[in-house]
Image: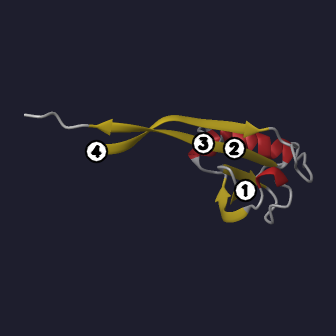
C-alpha cells in the first residue's frame, strides 16, 4: 500500500490594505523601484515600501524579512505581481495569504 498526497486546491487571498495595519501610505504617482518582501504567519507573504515592515498587519505577525526586490522585472510590469505593486503604490504594502489543501490518496497494488 502506498499513500501519496496530492494538492487539490491552492488559494490566494489578497488582504485588504489597512486591515490590522498600523499605517498606510499613499505614494500617489511616486514610482516604487524597490519593495521589501516579508513572510508572516498563516501563509502570508507581503511586499512593503517600509524596510522594517512596521506598516504590515499585526494579524499575520510575526513578520520575517526575506529580501529587497526590484520592481523593474517582468512580473511587476505585466505578470503576477503587477496588482500587488499597484496596491503597494496605493497603500504602502500588499499582503497575500497562500493556502494549499492536500488530500491523501491511497494506492493499493493489484494482485496478479
Pair 3/4: label in front: 4
Q: Position of residue 112 (x, y in %)?
A: 7, 34
In the rendered structure, find residue 99 and report the number of the disc placed on it.
3
Q: Is residue 98 visible?
A: yes
In front here: 50 or 8? 8
Marks 2 and 3, Cα distance to the nearest angstrom?
Answer: 10 Å
Query: How packed is label 1: few (under 14 Cα within 10 Å), some, or many (20 or more)?
Result: many
Marks 1 and 2, Cα distance to the nearest angstrom?
Answer: 15 Å
Q: Earlier in the sequence, mark 1 or mark 4?
A: 4
* Image-quadrant location for residue 28: top right
Are discs 1 and 4 less than 8 Å apart at CB?
no
Local secondary structure at mark 2: strand
Image quarter hosting the N terminus: top left
Local secondary structure at mark 3: strand
Q: Which residue is mark 4?
A: 2
Q: Position of residue 55 (x, y in %)?
A: 86, 56
Q: Residue furthest left?
A: 112
Pair 2/3: label in front: 3
Q: Position of residue 78 (x, y in %)?
A: 61, 37
Q: Residue at x 35, y 44 (%)?
A: 4
Q: Which residue is mark 2?
A: 96
Q: Earlier in the sequence, mark 3 or mark 4?
A: 4
Pair 4/2: label in front: 4
Marks 3 and 4, Cα distance to the nearest angstrom?
Answer: 25 Å
Pair 3/1: label in front: 3
In front here: 60 or 93? 60
Q: Which residue is mark 1?
A: 35
* Image-quadrant location for residue 65: bottom right
Pair 1/4: label in front: 4
Amino acid at each position: 500500500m502506498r499513500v501519496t498526497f496530492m494538492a487539490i486546491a491552492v488559494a490566494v487571498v489578497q488582504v485588504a490594505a489597512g486591515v490590522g495595519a498600523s499605517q498606510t501610505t499613499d505614494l500617489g504617482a511616486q514610482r516604487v523601484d524597490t519593495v521589501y518582501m516579508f513572510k508572516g504567519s498563516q501563509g502570508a507573504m507581503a511586499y512593503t515600501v517600509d524596510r522594517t515592515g512596521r506598516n504590515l498587519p499585526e494579524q499575520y505577525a510575526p513578520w520575517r524579512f526575506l529580501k529587497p526586490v526590484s520592481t523593474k522585472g517582468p512580473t511587476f510590469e505585466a505578470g503576477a505581481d503587477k496588482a500587488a505593486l499597484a496596491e503597494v503604490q496605493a497603500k504602502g504594502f500588499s499582503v497575500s495569504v497562500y493556502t494549499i489543501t492536500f488530500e491523501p490518496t491511497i494506492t493499493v497494488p493489484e494482485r496478479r
